Image (tube, rainbow, N blue to C red):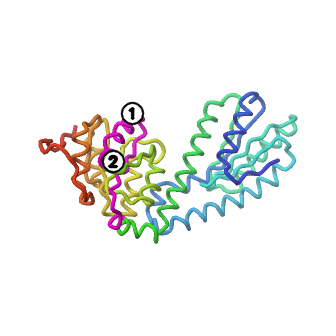
Protein backbone atom coordinates (compact mmCIF):
# COMPACT_ATOMS: atom_id res chain seq x y z
CA UNK A 1 0.00 0.00 0.00
CA UNK A 2 1.12 3.53 -0.80
CA UNK A 3 -0.09 6.87 0.59
CA UNK A 4 0.28 9.92 -1.69
CA UNK A 5 -0.10 13.46 -0.33
CA UNK A 6 2.58 15.31 -2.34
CA UNK A 7 1.40 16.37 -5.81
CA UNK A 8 -1.33 13.70 -5.71
CA UNK A 9 -2.98 14.96 -8.90
CA UNK A 10 0.14 14.28 -10.97
CA UNK A 11 0.83 10.93 -9.32
CA UNK A 12 -2.77 9.94 -10.10
CA UNK A 13 -2.36 11.02 -13.73
CA UNK A 14 0.71 8.82 -14.14
CA UNK A 15 -0.73 5.89 -12.19
CA UNK A 16 -4.00 5.80 -14.13
CA UNK A 17 -2.08 5.93 -17.39
CA UNK A 18 -0.48 2.68 -16.25
CA UNK A 19 -3.73 1.12 -15.00
CA UNK A 20 -5.72 1.83 -18.15
CA UNK A 21 -3.62 -0.73 -20.05
CA UNK A 22 -5.22 -3.46 -17.86
CA UNK A 23 -8.03 -1.95 -15.78
CA UNK A 24 -9.68 -5.30 -14.99
CA UNK A 25 -10.05 -5.87 -11.27
CA UNK A 26 -9.26 -2.31 -10.21
CA UNK A 27 -11.78 -0.41 -8.10
CA UNK A 28 -11.91 3.12 -6.72
CA UNK A 29 -13.38 4.43 -3.49
CA UNK A 30 -13.71 8.17 -2.98
CA UNK A 31 -14.77 10.17 0.08
CA UNK A 32 -15.94 13.55 -1.23
CA UNK A 33 -14.84 16.09 1.39
CA UNK A 34 -14.82 18.73 -1.38
CA UNK A 35 -18.62 18.91 -1.07
CA UNK A 36 -17.99 20.95 2.09
CA UNK A 37 -16.06 23.54 0.06
CA UNK A 38 -18.66 24.90 -2.34
CA UNK A 39 -17.95 28.31 -3.90
CA UNK A 40 -20.96 29.80 -2.15
CA UNK A 41 -19.82 28.59 1.27
CA UNK A 42 -16.24 29.75 0.75
CA UNK A 43 -17.16 33.21 -0.53
CA UNK A 44 -19.79 33.69 2.22
CA UNK A 45 -16.91 34.67 4.53
CA UNK A 46 -13.67 35.08 2.53
CA UNK A 47 -11.82 36.13 5.67
CA UNK A 48 -12.17 32.59 6.97
CA UNK A 49 -11.22 30.72 3.79
CA UNK A 50 -7.95 29.36 5.18
CA UNK A 51 -9.70 28.31 8.38
CA UNK A 52 -12.49 26.54 6.48
CA UNK A 53 -10.09 24.66 4.19
CA UNK A 54 -7.93 23.69 7.19
CA UNK A 55 -11.00 22.37 8.99
CA UNK A 56 -11.99 20.21 6.02
CA UNK A 57 -8.41 18.98 5.67
CA UNK A 58 -8.37 18.03 9.36
CA UNK A 59 -11.48 15.88 8.93
CA UNK A 60 -9.97 14.41 5.79
CA UNK A 61 -6.75 13.51 7.61
CA UNK A 62 -8.70 11.64 10.28
CA UNK A 63 -10.37 9.51 7.60
CA UNK A 64 -7.06 9.12 5.77
CA UNK A 65 -5.51 7.56 8.87
CA UNK A 66 -8.44 5.16 9.22
CA UNK A 67 -8.38 4.26 5.51
CA UNK A 68 -4.63 3.63 5.63
CA UNK A 69 -5.03 1.11 8.45
CA UNK A 70 -7.97 -0.64 6.80
CA UNK A 71 -6.26 -0.99 3.42
CA UNK A 72 -2.89 -2.05 4.82
CA UNK A 73 -3.45 -5.75 3.96
CA UNK A 74 -4.05 -4.93 0.27
CA UNK A 75 -0.79 -4.95 -1.71
CA UNK A 76 -2.06 -3.29 -4.92
CA UNK A 77 -3.45 -0.18 -3.28
CA UNK A 78 -2.78 3.57 -3.44
CA UNK A 79 -4.46 6.08 -1.12
CA UNK A 80 -4.57 9.74 -2.20
CA UNK A 81 -5.37 12.88 -0.22
CA UNK A 82 -6.07 15.98 -2.33
CA UNK A 83 -6.00 19.71 -1.55
CA UNK A 84 -9.79 19.88 -1.37
CA UNK A 85 -9.80 17.10 1.23
CA UNK A 86 -11.04 14.32 -1.02
CA UNK A 87 -9.70 10.85 -0.23
CA UNK A 88 -9.35 8.50 -3.20
CA UNK A 89 -8.35 4.85 -2.99
CA UNK A 90 -7.34 2.78 -6.01
CA UNK A 91 -7.11 -0.95 -5.22
CA UNK A 92 -6.91 -4.26 -7.04
CA UNK A 93 -7.93 -7.27 -4.94
CA UNK A 94 -5.73 -10.33 -5.47
CA UNK A 95 -8.44 -12.79 -4.44
CA UNK A 96 -12.20 -13.05 -3.79
CA UNK A 97 -11.39 -12.69 -0.08
CA UNK A 98 -9.62 -9.34 -0.69
CA UNK A 99 -12.50 -8.27 -2.91
CA UNK A 100 -14.96 -8.81 -0.07
CA UNK A 101 -12.56 -7.05 2.31
CA UNK A 102 -12.47 -3.95 0.08
CA UNK A 103 -16.27 -3.85 -0.09
CA UNK A 104 -16.48 -4.08 3.69
CA UNK A 105 -13.93 -1.25 4.01
CA UNK A 106 -16.09 0.87 1.74
CA UNK A 107 -19.02 0.39 4.13
CA UNK A 108 -16.81 1.26 7.12
CA UNK A 109 -15.61 4.47 5.44
CA UNK A 110 -19.20 5.45 4.76
CA UNK A 111 -20.04 4.95 8.43
CA UNK A 112 -16.88 6.70 9.65
CA UNK A 113 -18.08 10.14 8.50
CA UNK A 114 -21.72 10.23 7.44
CA UNK A 115 -21.48 13.92 6.54
CA UNK A 116 -19.30 12.97 3.55
CA UNK A 117 -20.60 11.12 0.51
CA UNK A 118 -18.61 8.03 -0.42
CA UNK A 119 -18.61 6.39 -3.88
CA UNK A 120 -17.46 2.99 -5.17
CA UNK A 121 -16.60 2.30 -8.83
CA UNK A 122 -15.04 -0.43 -10.94
CA UNK A 123 -12.44 1.03 -13.27
CA UNK A 124 -12.77 -1.53 -16.08
CA UNK A 125 -16.26 -0.37 -17.00
CA UNK A 126 -15.75 3.31 -16.27
CA UNK A 127 -12.33 4.33 -17.61
CA UNK A 128 -13.72 7.33 -19.49
CA UNK A 129 -15.13 8.87 -16.31
CA UNK A 130 -11.98 7.90 -14.44
CA UNK A 131 -9.92 9.92 -16.94
CA UNK A 132 -12.31 12.84 -16.46
CA UNK A 133 -11.71 12.47 -12.75
CA UNK A 134 -8.01 13.24 -13.28
CA UNK A 135 -8.89 16.47 -15.10
CA UNK A 136 -11.27 17.36 -12.28
CA UNK A 137 -8.54 16.75 -9.71
CA UNK A 138 -6.09 19.05 -11.50
CA UNK A 139 -8.78 21.72 -11.79
CA UNK A 140 -9.72 21.38 -8.13
CA UNK A 141 -6.08 21.84 -7.06
CA UNK A 142 -5.91 25.13 -9.00
CA UNK A 143 -9.23 26.16 -7.48
CA UNK A 144 -7.92 25.64 -3.94
CA UNK A 145 -4.83 27.69 -4.84
CA UNK A 146 -7.10 30.48 -6.08
CA UNK A 147 -9.19 30.51 -2.92
CA UNK A 148 -6.06 30.54 -0.77
CA UNK A 149 -4.79 33.51 -2.78
CA UNK A 150 -8.04 35.34 -1.98
CA UNK A 151 -7.43 34.65 1.71
CA UNK A 152 -4.07 36.52 1.64
CA UNK A 153 -5.53 39.71 3.09
CA UNK A 154 -2.33 41.76 3.26
CA UNK A 155 -1.38 41.07 -0.35
CA UNK A 156 -4.90 41.66 -1.66
CA UNK A 157 -5.12 44.98 0.23
CA UNK A 158 -2.23 46.38 -1.85
CA UNK A 159 -3.81 45.73 -5.27
CA UNK A 160 -4.91 49.36 -5.69
CA UNK A 161 -1.57 50.71 -4.48
CA UNK A 162 0.43 48.45 -6.79
CA UNK A 163 -1.75 49.45 -9.73
CA UNK A 164 -1.13 53.16 -9.10
CA UNK A 165 2.63 52.72 -8.66
CA UNK A 166 3.07 50.79 -11.89
CA UNK A 167 4.13 52.77 -14.98
CA UNK A 168 3.01 50.27 -17.65
CA UNK A 169 -0.68 49.42 -17.97
CA UNK A 170 -1.71 45.76 -17.75
CA UNK A 171 -4.70 44.03 -19.33
CA UNK A 172 -5.76 40.56 -18.14
CA UNK A 173 -7.60 38.40 -20.70
CA UNK A 174 -9.44 35.35 -19.35
CA UNK A 175 -10.47 33.20 -22.30
CA UNK A 176 -10.44 29.43 -22.82
CA UNK A 177 -11.05 29.65 -26.57
CA UNK A 178 -7.61 29.63 -28.19
CA UNK A 179 -8.58 31.70 -31.24
CA UNK A 180 -10.35 34.42 -29.26
CA UNK A 181 -7.59 34.57 -26.66
CA UNK A 182 -4.81 34.86 -29.25
CA UNK A 183 -6.80 37.40 -31.28
CA UNK A 184 -7.32 39.65 -28.24
CA UNK A 185 -3.70 39.27 -27.12
CA UNK A 186 -2.33 40.29 -30.51
CA UNK A 187 -4.44 43.44 -30.46
CA UNK A 188 -3.84 44.53 -26.87
CA UNK A 189 -0.12 43.68 -26.84
CA UNK A 190 0.51 46.38 -29.43
CA UNK A 191 -0.84 49.04 -27.07
CA UNK A 192 0.02 47.80 -23.59
CA UNK A 193 1.14 44.75 -21.63
CA UNK A 194 -1.33 41.85 -21.78
CA UNK A 195 -1.64 38.60 -19.83
CA UNK A 196 -3.67 35.64 -21.10
CA UNK A 197 -5.03 32.87 -18.85
CA UNK A 198 -7.45 30.11 -19.81
CA UNK A 199 -9.51 29.52 -16.67
CA UNK A 200 -11.00 31.28 -13.68
CA UNK A 201 -8.64 29.72 -11.17
CA UNK A 202 -5.60 31.16 -12.93
CA UNK A 203 -7.45 34.46 -13.41
CA UNK A 204 -7.95 35.00 -9.66
CA UNK A 205 -4.30 34.24 -8.89
CA UNK A 206 -3.09 36.40 -11.78
CA UNK A 207 -5.34 39.30 -10.77
CA UNK A 208 -3.97 39.35 -7.24
CA UNK A 209 -0.40 39.06 -8.53
CA UNK A 210 -0.54 41.66 -11.33
CA UNK A 211 -3.30 44.12 -10.25
CA UNK A 212 -4.45 44.70 -13.87
CA UNK A 213 -6.06 47.90 -15.14
CA UNK A 214 -8.61 45.99 -17.23
CA UNK A 215 -9.97 42.45 -17.16
CA UNK A 216 -11.75 40.78 -20.07
CA UNK A 217 -13.51 37.79 -18.51
CA UNK A 218 -15.36 35.10 -20.45
CA UNK A 219 -18.64 34.14 -18.77
CA UNK A 220 -18.45 30.51 -19.88
CA UNK A 221 -15.30 28.99 -18.39
CA UNK A 222 -14.47 25.42 -17.36
CA UNK A 223 -14.12 24.82 -13.63
CA UNK A 224 -14.63 28.12 -11.80
CA UNK A 225 -17.20 29.87 -13.97
CA UNK A 226 -16.84 33.44 -15.18
CA UNK A 227 -19.42 34.69 -12.68
CA UNK A 228 -17.76 32.88 -9.76
CA UNK A 229 -14.40 34.25 -10.89
CA UNK A 230 -15.96 37.71 -10.94
CA UNK A 231 -17.14 37.17 -7.34
CA UNK A 232 -13.58 36.43 -6.22
CA UNK A 233 -12.06 39.37 -8.12
CA UNK A 234 -14.61 41.84 -6.77
CA UNK A 235 -13.97 40.60 -3.25
CA UNK A 236 -10.23 41.27 -3.41
CA UNK A 237 -10.73 44.52 -5.37
CA UNK A 238 -14.17 46.19 -5.31
CA UNK A 239 -12.80 48.81 -7.73
CA UNK A 240 -11.88 46.25 -10.41
CA UNK A 241 -12.65 47.19 -14.02
CA UNK A 242 -14.07 43.93 -15.42
CA UNK A 243 -15.63 43.49 -18.86
CA UNK A 244 -17.50 40.23 -19.41
CA UNK A 245 -17.15 38.35 -22.71
CA UNK A 246 -19.75 36.02 -24.22
CA UNK A 247 -20.98 34.68 -27.56
CA UNK A 248 -24.56 35.03 -26.32
CA UNK A 249 -26.41 38.06 -25.02
CA UNK A 250 -28.78 36.43 -22.54
CA UNK A 251 -30.30 39.16 -20.41
CA UNK A 252 -30.13 37.04 -17.25
CA UNK A 253 -26.38 36.41 -17.62
CA UNK A 254 -25.59 40.04 -18.32
CA UNK A 255 -27.73 41.38 -15.47
CA UNK A 256 -26.21 38.82 -13.11
CA UNK A 257 -22.72 39.97 -14.10
CA UNK A 258 -23.64 43.62 -13.51
CA UNK A 259 -25.18 42.75 -10.14
CA UNK A 260 -21.92 41.05 -9.14
CA UNK A 261 -19.83 44.10 -10.04
CA UNK A 262 -18.94 43.84 -13.75
CA UNK A 263 -18.33 47.19 -15.46
CA UNK A 264 -19.48 46.17 -18.93
CA UNK A 265 -20.16 43.47 -21.48
CA UNK A 266 -18.57 42.69 -24.84
CA UNK A 267 -20.21 40.30 -27.29
CA UNK A 268 -17.99 37.87 -29.21
CA UNK A 269 -16.79 38.11 -31.88
CA UNK A 270 -15.59 41.66 -31.35
CA UNK A 271 -13.56 43.99 -33.55
CA UNK A 272 -10.13 45.41 -32.85
CA UNK A 273 -11.64 48.89 -32.56
CA UNK A 274 -14.26 47.87 -30.01
CA UNK A 275 -11.72 46.00 -27.91
CA UNK A 276 -9.31 48.95 -27.76
CA UNK A 277 -12.22 51.37 -27.21
CA UNK A 278 -13.19 49.35 -24.14
CA UNK A 279 -9.61 49.27 -22.84
CA UNK A 280 -9.30 53.05 -23.28
CA UNK A 281 -12.41 53.64 -21.15
CA UNK A 282 -10.79 52.15 -18.04
CA UNK A 283 -10.08 54.87 -15.46
CA UNK A 284 -6.76 53.14 -14.73
CA UNK A 285 -5.30 53.42 -18.25
CA UNK A 286 -2.95 56.39 -18.17
CA UNK A 287 -1.34 56.25 -21.63
CA UNK A 288 -3.34 57.30 -24.73
CA UNK A 289 -4.69 54.43 -26.84
CA UNK A 290 -5.44 55.13 -30.48
CA UNK A 291 -9.07 54.13 -31.19
CA UNK A 292 -11.87 55.28 -33.42
CA UNK A 293 -14.26 57.76 -31.76
CA UNK A 294 -17.19 56.52 -33.87
CA UNK A 295 -17.76 53.23 -32.06
CA UNK A 296 -21.27 53.03 -30.53
CA UNK A 297 -21.97 51.50 -27.15
CA UNK A 298 -22.93 47.80 -27.22
CA UNK A 299 -26.06 47.48 -25.14
CA UNK A 300 -28.32 44.98 -26.94
CA UNK A 301 -29.41 41.98 -24.90
CA UNK A 302 -31.85 39.18 -25.68
Q: Label 2's element?
A: strand
**Would you identify the image quadrant in which residue 233 lies?**
bottom left
Whole-percent x, y for residue 7 in the image: 67, 51
Q: Residue at x 43, y 66 (%)?
A: 156
Looking at the rendering, which quadrant does residue 185 occupy? top left
Residue at image position (41%, 57%) is: 207
**Mark nearer the N terminus (1 vs 2):** 1
Front-most of residues 183 and 152: 183
The numbered dot on residue 179 is 1
x, y percentage for residue 295? 15, 42
Q: Is residue 97 above or below residue 4?
A: above
Q: Residue furthest bottom?
A: 154
The residue that mark 2 highlights is: 216
Asked if the stretch drawn in magenta spans residue 176, the answer is yes
**Relative to 64, is 226 on the left or the right?**
left
Outermost left residue: 294
Distance (Cα) linking label 1 and label 2: 15 Å
Sort mark 2 into few (<14), some (14-19) or many (20+) by Cα contacts within 10 Å: many
Based on the picture, tell me whether residue 134 belongs to the magenta stretch.
no
In the rendered image, residue 267, in percent from the top left (x then y), is placed at 27, 39
Viewer-closest of 33 and 220: 220
Q: Between 115 and 244, which is closer to the camera in this rendering?
A: 244
Q: Secondary structure at mark 1?
A: helix
Stretch of the chain drawn in magenta: 163-191
- In depth, the one of 281 and 142 nearer the eye is 281
Residue under the image location 74 percent in, 30 percent down: 23
**At x 29% / y 48%, what residue is drawn?**
191
Amino acid sequence: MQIVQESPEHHLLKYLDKIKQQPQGWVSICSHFSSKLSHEKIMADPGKIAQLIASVQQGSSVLLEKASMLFEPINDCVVYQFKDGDILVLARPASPKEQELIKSIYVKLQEADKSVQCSYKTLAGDMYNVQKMVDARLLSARCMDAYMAVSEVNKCSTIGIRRKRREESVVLIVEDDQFTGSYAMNIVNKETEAILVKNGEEAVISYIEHAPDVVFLDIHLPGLSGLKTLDAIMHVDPDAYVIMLSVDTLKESILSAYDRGATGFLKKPFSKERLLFTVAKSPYISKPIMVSTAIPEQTTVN
